[in-house]
């Protein structure tokens, strides 16, 4: 079968396409990339999340690379992606993470993490794909493999970024939903180490993820939402399968969108004295633009996918970079999304301002001058060939109903701006003949109006 790398690695259905044969093909292609670009002296870190057979396939990968002459550091337990990535940075190593992130339980995947500790950019994954099935003789020297716990060095680093003493003063009840994910044994460990009280749900690894998905969105956080609603003055926190994404529930039991969290944290970090730009994707909310403008912060906009956000963070001085799907990182950390860090920053912001999450949201709307409303429609097509003609037609639109198109952006699909408080983004899914159509405005009425009048 053909191996393709998406926005964050190669993923496939376990025991169908994700097999030992294909894992060996991808492993050796990555090994060839590392040998060609860095030599065999480059250490390789290997980790895995709680998914079915992730430990088995990661062990196979480790043995293959050791056999080719590499020095391999293999995680002694389930590990979050951001923790593996941070260790790659401090050890000047490359890393391979076995995870399918927030995908359904039947999936498994491999992420390649270069030594800069962020998602591999397209030029890197393109080279890896070209290496597949090319003979790779390996080194004349013998490789080594050592098991290691990657948590301690990450924890020490996080203590330099987060004010745990301030969080300890927080009066809010914290509920952490382990969601059967890789964050178990890490996020709770950090809170315990700093004597921060919290309650928990689903604190064990289950490769079926409790019959749901390891995706910290409302439909998979129902028990957390109900717990928060029943508990006085409480918030809920969760992460996805490999803990690089976050999900936050406020005191009313409402899901707080990643866009709002990024904007809240941008304001908090600016007030902490951190300077720089904010990086967001073309799919992220106009709320972030409005808040950044009010704070005098430059906005850098990228295509969708954290590999683009991470690349911008490596090239610019950035306060925070984030995406609408629930990933963020900050200045002084790695250019990779980190759900553990995001959760801790939410707690720090609440504690330092002595405000509830609901109050922080209200402050955000006041600062922006409005609240934004969003929706998305998926348009299924018969073939990939239909995509380009539709996008070309969208680029020619000058008004939608009574709304005038004021600017057009084509860095990822087509984004139509309708003034500074409304937009429509049309972009292909990248994996199937499907167009995703995003709507955002400053009123529910306008949102419904645009959805009704937009035709392609």
Image (tube, grey):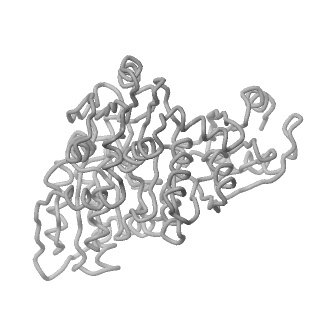
Residue at horizontal 21 percent and vertical 55 percent from the top:
151
Residue at horizontal 29 percent and vertical 57 percent from the top:
159
**Side of 45 relative to 438 (left or right):** left
Q: Quadrant of the C terminus?
A: top right
Nearest the viewer among 199 and 106 is 199
Provide residue 64's location: percent of width, then percent of height: 17, 64
Residue at horizontal 41 percent and vertical 42 percent from the top:
351
Nearest the viewer among 328 and 71 is 328
Q: How many marks?
A: 0
Provide residue 11's location: percent of width, then percent of height: 37, 48
Q: Is residue 196 above or below residue 84?
A: above
**Side of 302 relative to 196 (left or right):** right
Snapshot quadrant of residue 240: top left
Provide residue 435's location: percent of width, then percent of height: 63, 41
Provide residue 242's location: percent of width, then percent of height: 32, 46
Nearest the viewer among 322 and 191 is 191
């Amino acid at each position: 079968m053909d191996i393709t790398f998406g926005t964050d690695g190669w993923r496939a259905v376990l025991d169908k396409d994700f097999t030992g044969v294909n894992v060996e093909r991808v492993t050796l292609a990555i090994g060839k990339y590392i040998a060609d670009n860095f030599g065999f002296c480059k250490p390789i870190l290997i980790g895995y999340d709680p998914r079915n057979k992730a430990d088995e396939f990661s062990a196979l990968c480790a043995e293959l690379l050791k056999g080719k002459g590499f020095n391999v550091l293999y995680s002694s337990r389930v590990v979050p992606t951001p923790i593996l990535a941070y260790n790659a940075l401090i050890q000047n190593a490359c890393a391979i993470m076995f995870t399918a992130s927030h995908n359904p339980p039947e999936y498994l995947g491999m992420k390649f993490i270069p030594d800069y500790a962020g998602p591999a950019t397209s030029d890197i994954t393109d080279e890896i794909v070209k290496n597949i099935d090319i003979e790779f003789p390996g080194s004349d020297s013998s490789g080594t493999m050592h098991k290691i716990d990657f948590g301690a060095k990450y924890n020490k680093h996080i203590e330099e970024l987060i004010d745990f003493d301030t969080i300890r003063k927080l009066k809010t009840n914290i509920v952490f939903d382990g969601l059967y994910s890789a964050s178990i044994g890490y996020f709770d460990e950090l809170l315990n180490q700093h004597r921060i009280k919290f309650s928990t749900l689903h604190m064990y690894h289950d490769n079926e993820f409790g019959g749901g998905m390891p995706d910290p969105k409302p439909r998979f956080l129902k028990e957390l939402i109900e717990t928060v609603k029943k508990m006085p003055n409480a918030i809920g926190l969760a992460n996805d399968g490999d803990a690089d994404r976050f999900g936050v529930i406020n005191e009313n039991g409402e899901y707080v969108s990643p866009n709002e969290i990024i904007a809240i944290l941008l304001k908090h970090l600016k007030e902490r004295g951190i300077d720089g730009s904010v990086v967001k994707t073309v799919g992220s909310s106009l709320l972030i633009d409005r808040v950044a403008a009010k704070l005098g912060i430059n906005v850098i906009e990228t295509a969708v996918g954290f590999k683009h956000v991470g690349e911008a963070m490596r090239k610019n001085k950035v306060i925070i970079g984030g995406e609408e799907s629930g990933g963020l990182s900050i200045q002084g950390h790695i250019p990779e999304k980190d759900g553990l860090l995001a959760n801790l920053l939410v707690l720090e912001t609440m504690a330092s301002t002595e405000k509830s999450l609901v109050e922080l949201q209200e402050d955000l709307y006041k600062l922006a001058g409005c609240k934004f409303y969003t929706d998305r429609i998926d348009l299924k097509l018969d073939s990939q060939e239909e995509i380009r003609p539709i996008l070309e037609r969208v680029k020619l639109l000058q008004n939608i109903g009574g709304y005038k198109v004021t600017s057009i952006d084509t860095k990822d699909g087509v984004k139509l701006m309708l003034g500074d408080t409304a937009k429509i983004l049309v972009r292909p899914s990248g994996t199937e003949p499907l167009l995703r159509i995003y709507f955002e405005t400053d009123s529910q009425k306008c949102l419904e109006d645009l959805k009704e009048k937009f035709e392609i």
